[in-house]
Image: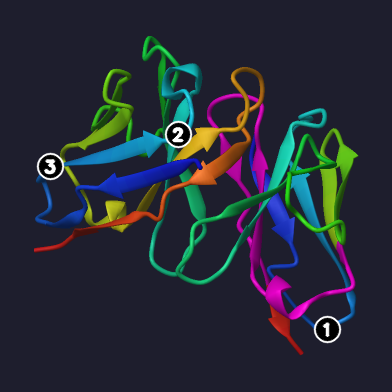
Amino acid sequence: EVQLWESGGGLVQPGGSLRLSCAASGFIFSNYAMIWVRQAPGKGLEWVSGISESGDSTYYADSVKGRFTISRDNSKNTVFLQMDSLRAEDTAVYYCAKRRDTSGLYNLDFWGQGTLVTVSS
Amino acid sequence: SQMTQSPSSVSASVGDRVTITCRASQGIHRWLAWYQQKPGKAPKLLIYAASSLQSGVPSRFSGSGSGTDFSLTISGLQPEDFATYYCQQANSFPLAFGGGTKVEIK
């Protein structure tokens, strides 16, 4: 059974940092690209970042480029999102998700339960 | 490509047929996915490649379209289908989601 479990969310002051983790199980983690998606309270889904199977390629939304860093540790089946210079508008539930196929389109077939990040003084 | 969904909400009754549309700002062939999200839960993949049904998803859900115009149809709305639905451009980064369509009980 595929499982994704996010952790690391919490309350942080503007300008602060947080590191989110997403632990995966139930599939060959190193074969799949991984994605972070966020959802601000009462709002829709927003793609944040993506990382290739090996970790060699990373991608970011313009809204987080230069502030967030995605990485992965295939030996620990975990993907990370380092979030620096946090702003109030980064307040959201952050989901990690798995690409459905080992190549091709980015259809996201499994999602974690989400972790809430609140940026406030 | 930016994704625009309509309507933003729809009221319907159990048994109704509901259609949600999604328009891409540029052609994306059939590289579109649809998700269902219930309050407090993670999104669930329903449809990929515009019309392929994800494993385990009931056949009352169907998708169609190509290029810039797509639709999701629920044939015979069930109580568990009241939720918010999102389309997503799935081809390449930056990925993009539509604004969502909330299906509410009439």
Q: Which stretch did the figure color magenta?
A: B74-102
Spot occupied by residue A121 in the image (x, y as percentages of width and height): 8, 63
Q: Which amino acid does label 3 sit on?
A: Ser
Spot occupied by residue A66 in the image (x, y as percentages of width and height): 26, 27
Q: What residue type is labelled 2?
A: Ile
Residue B86 seen anywhere in this rendered image of the structure:
yes
Lower sequence index among marks 2 and 3: 3
Q: Could you confirm whether marks 2 and 3 are on the same chain?
A: yes
Query: Which structural element holds mark 3?
Result: loop
Spot occupied by residue A77 in the image (x, y as percentages of width and height): 33, 27
Q: Tell me, for residue B14, which label it has, or none.
A: 1
Q: Tell which of B58 and B32 is nearer to you.
A: B58
Please identify, in this view, whether the residue under mark 1 or under mark 3 is nearer the observer. 1
Q: In the rendered view, tell whether residue A106 sits above or below residue B54.
A: above
Residue B25 seen anywhere in this rendered image of the structure:
no
Q: Tell me, for residue A17, which label it has, or none.
A: 3
Query: Which structural element holds mark 1?
Result: loop
Chain at tag 2: A
Left or right: where A81 falls relative to B3 = left
Q: Could you confirm whether marks 1 and 2 are on the same chain?
A: no
- Residue B79 in magenta stretch: yes
Q: Tell me, for residue A35, which label it has, or none.
A: 2
Spot occupied by residue A10 in the image (x, y as percentages of width and height): 17, 57
Left or right: where A108 falls relative to B85 = left
Alpha-carbon distance for marks 1 and 2? 35 Å
State which quarter of the image contains the C terminus of chain B.
Answer: bottom right
Please identify, in this view, whether the residue under mark 2 or under mark 3 is nearer the observer. 2
Q: What residue type is labelled 1?
A: Val
Residue at figure coordinates x 46%, y 35% from the top left = A26
Chain at tag 3: A
Residue at figure coordinates x 63%, y 35% from the top left = A107
